[in-house]
Amino acid sequence: MDDDLVVEPTGSDLHGEAERLRARGPAVRVRLPEDIGAWAVSDFDWLRELLTDPRVSKDPEQHWSAWRRGEHRQSWARWWVGQSSMLTAYGADHRRLRRLVAPAFSARRIEALAPAIRCRTGELLEEMAATAPGASVDLRTAFAHPLPMAVICELFGIPAGDQRAVGEVFDLMMNSFDDLERAQTAQADALEIFRRLVAHKREQPGEDLTSALVSARDEDDGSRLTEQELLDTLFTMVGAGHETTVNLIGNAVHALLTHPEQLALVQAGSATWSDVVEETLRWAPSIANLPLRFAVEDIALPDGSGTIREGEAILPAYAAAGRSPDKHGPDAHVFDLTRAEPEHLAFGHGVHFCLGAPLARMEGRIALSALFERFPRLRLATAPEHIPQVPSWIAHGHRRLPVLLT
């Protein structure tokens, strides 16, 4: 439609765009890259309601009319909705797939990872400290990226020799919306790595989630998990578990260094690192917009201004909802660690709530507290306006984060 808001592919003005979404109402028609139409939902309370509404699905094969007509299958949407994992499953299929993965993210299993996270954090900080005095360090490359990658690879038993390649291909996929061929090649490379991993775990199983999934696939003759579901589950969990935590750490550091009065609160003990993590997730969520969900039946907008028709796509606009003045008051745009209730939807809500949320939160707390303890005079090496954002309308983070350690 001519009056649809056009989403800028590289996310050059995510929060300005979010403000324009909110100004149009709780849900508005948008044109996503490659001319994909959707309803962007920016109202916090209604978005949270929709995330638990059985009239909303994540399965395009059943519920996206355009996809069922054969449209968009060669677009960027193919690796966000065109896979067989719990990310896109609906109803009983989703429950089946989630049950297979959930035990790996139990409170006991997550807490058991804490010593390894602290150890790897310390190693990375010492490597940064070895930098020549006065030199600028890219915190994303040196710290925010390798730490979550090491943790998720440990959880899934990915060999050290493949970890760099896994990180590179997911970065390409998240940030290559202007180069579809390059992104598709990255996806193929990732799936080949996971095929090799599955083959290796079949021969030499270990105490990792990949081995558990392979066992579930093989011991039950595939009735609980198909081979494609196995590969797509690995693809989804590793990608989501890595990229979101990279941006959480980077966004939190950027927020603190551009709001020194807030950093002072933490260093004085007037705010906690948990406060930092939660306010960052509200103010600058790692995923700005998460494609896609679909209307199972007609859904009336809460203000009576229109209807999302059966089979239409829905885009949860998490960045817009996180700064909603209706939810968080007139200072919703302000990064404030003293905020009484920094409620957010950064990990989703309802049956698709992120299984890795407790792990991401723990990684964030450990990483941030250790970073600022080791480098209490950490500061940006360049003006904030010169720090480039990740070129994506989905991911919300920094392509580089140059800092000075002292």
Image: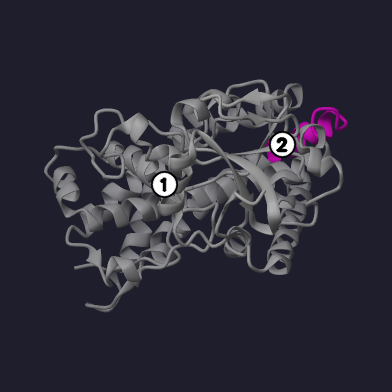
- Magenta span has 219? yes
Q: Residue at x 83, y 35 (%)?
A: 218
Q: Residues within 10 Å of mark 2 (few under 14, many from 20)?
A: many
The percent position of residue 400, horizontal first and vertical second, equals 41, 67
Q: Main secondary structure of the magenta part?
A: helix
Q: Amino acid at mark 2?
A: Glu
Residue 51 lies, with reference to residue 10, above or below; the image says above
Q: Amino acid at mark 1?
A: Glu
Residue 160 lies, with reference to residue 368, above or below; the image says below
The percent position of residue 96, horizontal first and vertical second, equals 73, 25
The percent position of residue 253, horizontal first and vertical second, equals 31, 55
| Picture quadrant of residue 67 | top right
- Does 253 sit left or right of 286 as displayed? left
| Picture quadrant of residue 156 | top right
The disc at residue 341 is: none
Q: Residue at x 40, y 44 (%)?
A: 363
Residue on which disc 2 sits: 312
Q: Residues within 10 Å of mark 1 (few under 14, many from 20)?
A: some
Q: Secondary structure at mark 2?
A: loop
Residue 389 lies, with reference to residue 16, above or below; the image says below
Magenta stretch: give its range. 211-225
Q: Is residue 399 visible?
A: yes
Residue 128 lies, with reference to residue 77, above or below; the image says below
The disc at residue 19 is: 1
* Quadrant holding the C terminus: bottom left
Compute the Cα span from label 2 to label 1: 23 Å
